[in-house]
């Protein structure tokens, strides 16, 4: 399951269905930090893709549910994620102003 799966399914679901992506993790390891930028690793990270059909009564029938390790979805190269602080909250970002440490050979 890649991120393209969500995009592909989102275009194909019926009006009475909902598609959600949930990211779970057991903890956060701080790899590196400056004042407003950091790089973190999500411990035991996983992504769950869930497609449900919603009946008129409000009952939700699960049509599809897949869970994969976060590193499998993002790729091993993305096991360390950049985050950005805005006010007092931290957000995932694509911007990584911190130098990437060299991998020992």
Image (spheres, rainbow, N blue to C red):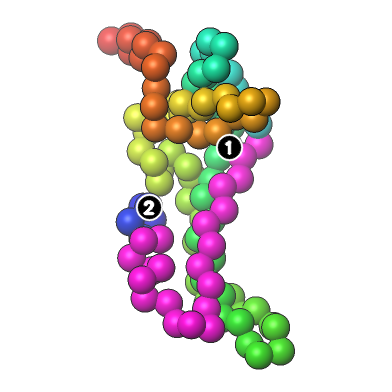
Quarter of the image for residue 13 reads bottom left
User: Residue 16: horizontal and vertical position, in percent?
Assistant: 53, 83
Label 2 CA crowd tier, 10 Å (few <14, some 14–19, many 20+): few
| Magenta-highlighted residues | 6-26
> Is 61 situated above or below 5?
below
| Tag 2 residue | 3
Horizontal and vertical percent position of residue 98:
41, 13
Q: Do residues under tags 2 and 1 come within 8 Å of each other at their CB atoms?
A: no
Q: Secondary structure at mark 1?
A: loop
Q: Return the residue found at the far left.
A: 105
> Does residue 24 belong to the magenta stretch?
yes
Q: Confirm whether residue 71 shows in the render.
A: yes
Q: Nearer the viewer, residue 20 or 87?
A: 87
Residue drawn at 50 percent across, 60 percent down:
49
In the figure, residue 8 lies in which quadrant? bottom left
The residue positioned farthest toward the front in the image shown: 87
Residue 32 is tagged as none
> Residue at the location (28% across, 10% down)?
105
Badge 2 marks a residue whose secondary structure is: helix
49 in the magenta segment: no
In the rendered image, the quadrant that contains the N terminus is bottom left
Query: Residue 66: x percent and y percent?
Result: 50, 61
Residue 57 is situated, as x and y percent measured from the top left of the image, at 71, 89
Residue that carries the numbered disc 1 in the rendered image: 44
């Amino acid at each position: 399951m890649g991120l393209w799966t969500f995009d592909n399914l989102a275009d194909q679901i019926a009006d009475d269905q909902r598609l959600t992506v949930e990211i779970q993790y057991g903890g956060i390891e701080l790899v590196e930090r400056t004042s407003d930028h950091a790089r973190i690793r999500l411990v035991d990270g996983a992504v769950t893709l869930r497609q449900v059909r919603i009946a008129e009564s409000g009952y939700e029938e699960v049509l599809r549910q897949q869970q994969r390790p976060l590193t499998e979805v993002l790729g091993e190269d993305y096991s360390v994620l950049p985050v950005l602080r805005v006010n007092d909250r931290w957000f995932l970002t694509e911007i990584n102003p911190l130098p990437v440490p060299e991998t020992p050979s």
